[in-house]
Amino acid sequence: MRRVPLLLKVVIGIYAVSFVLPTLPHDLGVEVFAKAWVGLALLFSQSPLGAILVFAPWLANPAFWCGAYFCARQRWTKAVWTGTAASLLALSSIPFFVSQSQHGNIGLGYFVWLASMFLLTGVGLIGLLRAHGRGVRDFTDLTPPT
């Protein structure tokens, strides 16, 4: 059984914390996440393509979990690609948040969530470089080198 890298656990913790921080002036991240589920279900019942286009940023969440899975399985190339996809999907939500918030007042939860996507990509890159012997220090295992 493979050991889950410590840095991956930290990134997943950051991702989880983002859901209890404010995202919009009156909504916590978990509330925005739940509203997205309801909206996604309603849109899929009308137009699946429209739902995908409107909720593309929400798809960053399953992409994040796929990337975390690939990191845990040490499939570094796939982890980098899914982490990059999650980051780009998360960035696509900026126009939505700016239009929904008063004067672009986006809460800390969004930025923590966004950071977790980029950090996941970083974990994948560190693993990939380390696997190819590029001399990158193993940041995922904090034990002293032997």
Image (cartoon, rainbow, N blue to C red):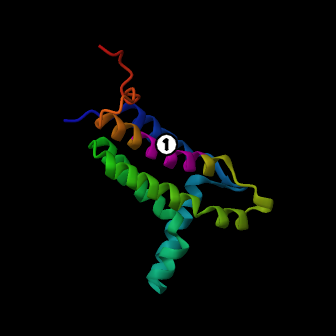
User: Which residue reaches farthest bottom?
Assistant: 46
Quadrant location, the C terminus: top left
Q: Magenta span: helix, strand or loop, mainly?
A: helix
Q: Where does the N terminus fall, quadrant-wise?
A: top left
**In the current view of this chain or complex, which residue is farthest to the front?**
134
Q: Residue at x 32, y 52 (%)?
A: 78
Whether residue 36 is in magenta: the answer is no
Q: Which residues are magenta?
A: 112-123
How packed mark 1 is, by other alpha carbons closer than 10 Å (few <14, some 14-19, many 20 or more), is many
| Residue 121 on image: x %, y % | 44, 46
Q: Residue 110 location in percent, x, y?
A: 61, 52
**Above or below, 142 relative to 74:** above
Residue 48, visible in the rendered structure: yes
Secondary structure under the numbered disc 1 in the rendered image: helix
Q: Quadrant of residue 62?
A: bottom left
Q: Which residue is mark 1?
A: 119
Residue lying farthest to the left in this orientation: 1
Instruction: Tell which residue pokes out farthest to the right in this image.
Output: 103
Name which residue lies at 31% across and 48% down: 70
The residue at the point 71 percent across, 63 percent down is 98
Along the viewing direction, whichever of 129 and 45 lies nearer the viewer? 129
> Relative to residue 68, is residue 131 depicted above or below?
above
Residue 114 shown in magenta? yes
Q: Position of residue 49 (x, y in %)?
A: 46, 81
Q: Does residue 19 show up?
A: no
**Residue 77 horizontal/vertical position (percent):** 32, 49
Foreground: 2 or 44?
A: 2
Amino acid identity at mark 1: Leu
Work out whether residue 48 or residue 67 is closer to the camera in this orientation and state it.
67
* Count of picture labels: 1
Residue depicted at 51% across the width and 81% down the height: 50
